[in-house]
Image (cartoon, rainbow, N blue to C red):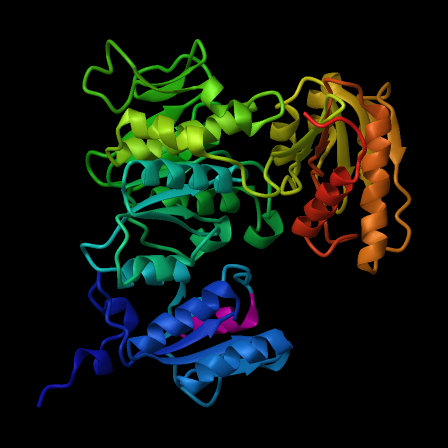
Amino acid sequence: MSTPESAVTPAEERAWPGLDVSGLRILVAGFGISGYAVADQTMQRGAHVLVVDGADTPELRERAQILEVLGVEVRLGAEHLDGLPQDRPLDLVVTSPGWRPEQPLLRAAQEAGVPVWSEIELARRMQAADGPAWLAVTGTNGKTTTVTMLESILLRAGLRAVACGNVGLPVIEAALDPAGFDVLALELSSFQLHWTQHLDCEAAAVLNVSDDHLDWHGGAEAYAAAKGRIYEGVRTACIYNVADPTTLRLVEEADVREGARAIGIGLSTPGLSELGVIDGILADRAFLAERRTSAAELATLEDLAPLGPQGAGPHVVIDALAAAALARAHGVEPWAVRDGLRAYRMGSHRAQHLATIDGIGYVDDTKATNPAAAAASLRAAERVVWIAGGDAKGADLGPLIAAAHDRLVGVVLLGRDDAPFTAALSRHAPEVPVRRIDPGDTDGVAGRSRLMEDAVQAARALAEAGDVVLLAPAAASIDQFRDYAERGDLFAAAVTRLPGERA
């Protein structure tokens, strides 16, 4: 009698697409959303699954009980992270994106020859050959806006599509959905891409690359290289930002399928094989047969006007062009691009226009946790009262403030340590008034709410009609808030309490 493939073939040697995981002994490293999805999807298909996580909380224990009933073993606590388990052999480790490459368990797996995959790698291999097309987005900033714009466009085109990955569903759930999607719009982080070898997207975009997460990756080159993995195996189009030479270099270095094209996006008149802007029109000179002599109208800047208090900022327009390029690479007609962009509205905390009160706009971009993201947000308005500060993570704030100082009406600083911001402001914008908010006690929600209330009141006092009060901190929230979302929620709540005439 022959032995079934599932009993003898290592994970890396099993045929895919449509990878059969039955019989594989899989360790899932991390019990977050993607880790739970991996355990659930592989267990259902006959894998023997062990999940480990360093945390041991009531929430995780409750989640573990659900899977343990179905035969998944879950081990919680830091003692399970020091190396591979000694009581069982392993065929595969699937790691959550937050785990660093030098983490002892992952390092032990690599030294033992056990493959380490991301959820994305596993999903790509398990998805059937006739499964949904993949359209993927990465970049230091703008990923979520672009991928949700893309989802809106695809849905308007009548396709069964979903945003997944770093936003929405885990990719493995979307890829293996029993009803079947036509297209997946994937947001992928550098962490996810680091552990991914095979993407084979129909089209992919790198929006921008600026210094971020360098400690995790070990340097700027490794970080950029992780972003560039998104282009590997692309079949139709590699979308790059004409204003960011690194994105073009990553395209040039990528190993793509024969016939894949490099497609540029930019804010000026598009050249051949580019999308750009002509007299307020988003124009396509890439995905039409007569592109040498004409361009297709996709949408207008007026269509995007609701996406900012003074119209869509330049970074939002770039995101829209990237979404349009990805959709056009899939064959979506121009009318669907237009309708999808017209229907789109910003998600919470991403350049979200909250209100206009007494002629002053209030914008929540708390997700702008690094200087590059804050710079893009600041460029979207002519006169800004900027609420900034937090854990700057050692970032150089000088270039950001030097570029923005002509737009700054005033600055309100949060954060336990305001020195990085005050030093850069005194050097590059000494004439701009700065209000420092006393950190006080922020251990409880009441203290954090008070902090943000004071910041909004200080910003209101600095602003005049026509100005924008912008929360774009250029820093992480962890020194004073639970997370960036709480920071944004408290900002929105404080704005709601402001008196005045609302437009």
Q: For the C terminus, which image quadrant?
A: top right
- In the image, is residue 273 above or below residue 58? above
Q: Residue at x 81, y 23 (%)?
A: 463
- In the image, is residue 403 above or below residue 417? above
**Residue 104 located within the stretch drawn in magenta:** yes
Q: Please provide percent x and percent y for residue 271.
A: 34, 14
Q: Residue at x 22, y 41 (%)?
A: 257
Q: Residue at x 58, y 54 (%)?
A: 216
Q: Please provide percent x and percent y for residue 75.
A: 54, 82
Q: Please provide percent x and percent y for residue 228.
A: 41, 42
**Residue 58 located within the stretch drawn in magenta:** no
Q: Residue at x 46, y 34 (%)?
A: 344
Q: For the N terminus, which image quadrant?
A: bottom left
The span shown in magenta is: 103-112
Q: Can the viewer see residue 416 in this picture? A: no
Question: On the rendered structure, is 174 left or right of 279?
Answer: left
Q: Residue furthest left?
A: 1
